[in-house]
């Protein structure tokens, strides 16, 4: 079966592509996980982050947003020293800041899911890209999301990262039309 070309580099990318990428996520814990992972990915390859995903889950208390939001200097220093994750101080601090902002959004909207999905009116966008070269790095929706997240205090949420986040959590179906997952996702989530 034909797959998106980006997924062919490693088994972890193929697994992620086949089972997760583009599948709509509405669970706040998963939405928080992808927010942290996308922020960690900035400037790096997605495969680097995927290979460290298990270490991230352990280091960040399985993405329990309330726990991460309460991390103190001791925990932050523990994260800075953790060789299993990307030890960029700005990204680690941003993860904690984003947890705090995430909790505030949950309180305001009832869930982060309710807030974030408004940028696509609650329904996945079904794109029809012929090749990976056709897929944009950002869109008007990701720009609006980025601006709003920044106003709410989030870090590492530029328009390009927001679009990658939208792809990861299934707000957009960006599997190319020749990929077997494109039709499956379109049929199941339209």
Image: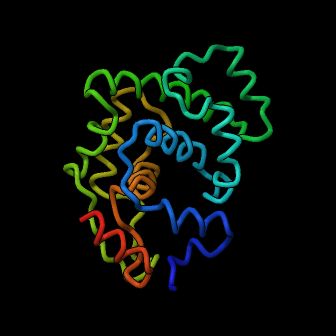
Residue 69 spot, x, y in % from top left: 52, 21
Question: Depth check: 49 or 2 in front?
Answer: 2
Which quadrant would the C terminus be assigned to in this image?
Answer: bottom left
Give the residue displayed 67% in from the left and 69% down from the top: 11
Give the residue displayed 40% in from the left and 23% down from the top: 103
Give the residue displayed 34% in from the left and 34% down from the top: 112
Toward the front, the furthest residue is 188
Question: Depth check: 140 or 187 in front?
Answer: 187
Residue 166 spot, x, y in % from top left: 38, 53
Give the number of marks. Answer: 0
Toward the left, the furthest residue is 121
Vertical placement of 185 versus 133: above or below?
A: above
Left/right placement of residue 116 relative to residue 61 reads left
Quadrant of residue 149 in the image? top left
Q: How is the image coloured?
A: rainbow
Left/right placement of residue 96 relative to residue 53 reads left
Give the residue displayed 51% in from the left and 85% down from the top: 1
Residue 62 spot, x, y in % from top left: 59, 34
Residue 178 spot, x, y in % from top left: 41, 85
């Amino acid at each position: 079966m034909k797959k998106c070309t980006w997924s062919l580099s490693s088994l972890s990318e193929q697994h992620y592509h086949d089972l997760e990428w583009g599948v709509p996520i509405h669970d706040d814990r998963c939405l928080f996980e992808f927010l942290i992972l996308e922020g960690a990915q900035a400037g790096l390859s997605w495969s680097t982050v995927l290979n460290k995903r298990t270490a991230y889950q352990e280091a960040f208390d399985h993405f329990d947003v309330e726990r991460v939001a309460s991390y103190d200097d001791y925990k932050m220093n523990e994260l800075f020293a953790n060789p299993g994750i990307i030890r960029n101080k700005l990204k680690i601090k941003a993860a904690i800041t984003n947890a705090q902002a995430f909790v505030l959004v949950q309180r305001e909207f009832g869930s982060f899911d309710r807030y974030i999905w408004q940028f696509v009116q609650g329904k996945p966008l079904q794109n029809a890209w012929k090749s990976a070269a056709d897929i944009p790095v950002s869109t008007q929706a990701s720009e609006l999301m980025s601006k709003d997240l920044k106003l709410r205090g989030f870090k590492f949420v530029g328009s390009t990262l927001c679009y990658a986040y939208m792809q990861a959590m299934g707000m957009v179906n960006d599997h190319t039309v020749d990929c077997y997952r494109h039709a499956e996702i379109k049929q199941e989530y339209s």
